[in-house]
Image: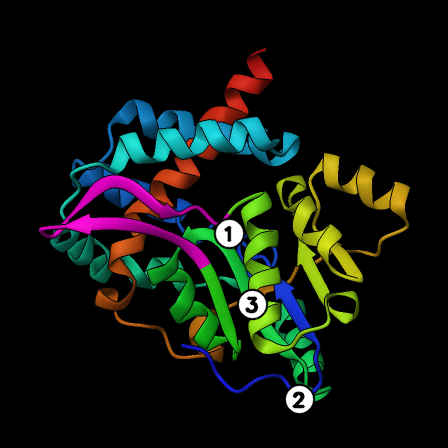
Amino acid sequence: MLLAVSSTGVAAFFDLDKTIIAKSSAYVFSRAFFQEGLINRRAVLKSAYAQFMYLLAGADTEQMERMRAHITAQCTGWDIAQVTAIVEETLHDVVDPLVYAEATDLIATHRQRGEDIVVVSASGAEVVQPIAKMIGATHSVATRMVTQGGRYTGDVEFYCAGENKALAAQQLAEEQGYEMHRCHAYSDSISDLPLLEAVGHPTAVNPDRALRREAQQRGWPVLAFSNPVSLRTRIPAPSGAQIAAAVGLGAVAAAGAAWYGLRRWQR
């Protein structure tokens, strides 16, 4: 839902995982999805090991596209009702602890200056939107999956990653009157380099090695967030039904990112 056009012409664009929250918004569901038979043991083992390698190595454009193909193949046919039930049963584990205190302080600073907060994430829209609302964001942009007859078709309507994040931010800027040269962006991943380049004030947060190197070369600020706090103690948690449809996508996205990190490490 779009709110009123910004009065300041400035927005702060935030990535979600590893930037606002200390863990992947989807990766923490992998155990529950394995227990319910949505993913197999091999996928869990790949995710558990390769997630670490992915975080170290980051992901380039080619890998992001391969990841997208892996996501669609994995979740095709998943029953949204089953996903809803899993989310409702495991939501407590997902939200405690999750949010970086430093991120909430930074968001509060931008809001005090009258600037809009925009969460831009590769995770599914149904999980990103409630979290964005919790932290007081003005807008959110996220990946959208196609569903039919209560199941995922395997098609992606919009994959909010890489260049698409920057394009989505620029489109929103046109709609809301943001001046991109005055805007801020925060991310941990080299895959978000296009988004960081699109604004006048980019900042790396807990960056992977590739983004840290890029930030140092360009003289961008680098922030270290290290104090996660309980999400439930700061903002009310959404219902499982609100975020169910995208959790399947998000869980597979985390697994896919991990798998391609492992493939890159092996090469």
Disc tally is 3
Q: Say if the magenta span includes residue 116.
A: no
Q: Quadrant of residue 217?
A: top right
Left or right, residue 182 beside residue 154 = right
Depth check: 156 or 224 in front?
Answer: 156
* Residue in the foreground of this view, choosing between 22 and 135: 135
Q: Where is residue 147? Give x, y as percent.
A: 20, 50
Q: Position of residue 183 (x, y in %)?
A: 73, 69
Q: Residues within 10 Å of mark 3 (few under 14, many from 20)?
A: some
Q: With 36 as the anchor, is 72 left or right in this view?
A: right
Which circle, 3 or 1, is nearer the viewer?
Answer: 3
The residue tagged 2 is 7
Crowd tier of the residue under label 2, counting other residues whose Cα lies within 10 Å: few below 14, some 14–19, many 20 or above? few
Residue visible at 53% across and 27% down in the picture: 63
The answer, for residue 163, to whether it is visible in the render is yes
State the CA–CA distance, disc 3 to disc 1: 27 Å
Where, quadrant-wise, is the N terminus in this rendering?
Answer: bottom left
Q: Is residue 196 above or below residue 211?
A: below
Q: Distance between the residues labelled 1 and 2?
A: 33 Å
Under circle 2, the secondary element is loop
- Residue named by callout 1: 23
Q: Is mark 1 on a helix, strand or loop?
A: loop
Say which amino acid is labelled 2: Ser
Question: Which numbered disc flags the more N-terminal residue, 2 or 3?
Answer: 2
- Residue type at mark 1 is Lys
Quarter that holds the C terminus: top right
Q: What residue is disc 3 on?
A: 172
Depicted 166 relative to depicted 135: above or below: above
Q: Give the mark nearest the N terminus, 1 or 2.
A: 2
Q: Which of marks 1 and 2 is in front?
A: 2
Dot 3 amino acid type:
Leu
Read off the magenta span.
142-160
